[in-house]
Amino acid sequence: MKCARGLVPHETASRRTLREMEMWKTLRHPNVLPFIGSVTLDSKLYLVSPWMPNGDAMKYVNTHPNVDRVAILLQVARGLRYLHTRTLPFVHGDLKAANVLISQNGDARIADFGLSRWAINGSSYGCSDAWRLAGNPRWQAPELMQASDGGEIPRRTTESDIFAFGRFMIEIYTGKYPFPHLPSGSFVIAAVLVKGTLLQDRPMEPEVVSRGLDDNAWLIITDCCRKEPLRRLTVQKLILRLKSL
């Protein structure tokens, strides 16, 4: 079960949870975590989904070192394609290994739709400034960390989801967060990334290379994490490239 974090007022938490529920319950795909229902306990609204005994994708690859990592990446990419190609496209907004859960059978399921939103012309629509500012810069596209000339806070887009997927690929191959050498403070990470560091140095440890992080895989990561949003891979091209690995 999931409920909004206790660091926000109860009314705000309830509103966010209801918004997430309204969006999540419309989703049906083998690589998206199913929504079962909701329950209120001690005045808190909880969202209920099936139990995923293998935990999140980071934990799974670290406890199953011989797992087929390309299969995981393809499953998540197919789930992302489902979101991005709906009649009204759906921006996940917070794609990372912690938000991909692994089923009993080893299938990947995209989860946590707290920062998700419908997209209008590719951009998330109808969200507050607090929502737009949420997220972790380890996975965020550079345009999300820079206000426009008019001071407007950028919206998450299908292209920023693709950028996050590139960083997610690094997690799957290395078993570590992107930019593992940087301290956890968001402001420290953002200060480094805003300066133009789109990718960490390519991991070259023999064990990482043996897991499949070769030249072709690194090029896919690079093409997902382009600075200019329109130069990033579309989700369909991403799937085709992953199939070639």
Image (spheres, helix red, strand yellow):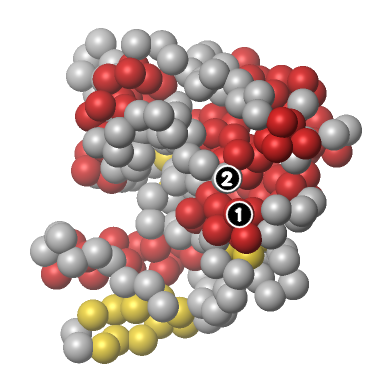
* Disc 1: which residue: 62
In this view of the protein, which residue sits in the foreground, 85 or 229? 229
Mark 2 and mark 1 residues within 8 Å of each other at the beta carbon = yes
Q: Quadrant of residue 55?
A: bottom right
Rendered location of residue 97, percent (x, y): 53, 50
Residue 94 appearing in the image: yes
Estimate the spatial distance between the alpha carbons at disc 2 and disc 1, rounded to whole Å. Answer: 6 Å
Residue type at the position of mark 1: Asn
Residue type at the position of mark 2: Gly
Q: Residue at x 23, y 80 (%)?
A: 44
Number of residues whose C-alpha sits closer than 10 Å to that of mark 1, classed few (under 14), some (14–19) or many (20 or more):
some
Rendered location of residue 73, percent (x, y): 71, 46
Number of residues whose C-alpha sits closer than 10 Å to that of mark 2, classed few (under 14), some (14–19) or many (20 or more):
many
Q: Judging from the image, what secondary structure is the residue with disc 2 in?
A: loop
For the C terminus, which image quadrant? top right
Q: Which mark is residue 175?
A: 2
Q: Residue at x 25, y 36 (%)?
A: 185
Q: Residue furthest right?
A: 244
Rendered location of residue 237, percent (x, y): 77, 30
Q: Is residue 5 left or right of residue 90?
A: left
Q: Is residue 183 left or right of residue 216?
A: left
Q: Quadrant of residue 197?
A: top left
Rendered location of residue 206, percent (x, y): 71, 31
Q: Judging from the image, what secondary structure is the residue with disc 1 in?
A: helix
Q: Residue furthest left?
A: 9
Q: Residue at x 60, y 54 (%)?
A: 62
Q: Is residue 218 left or right of residue 180?
A: right
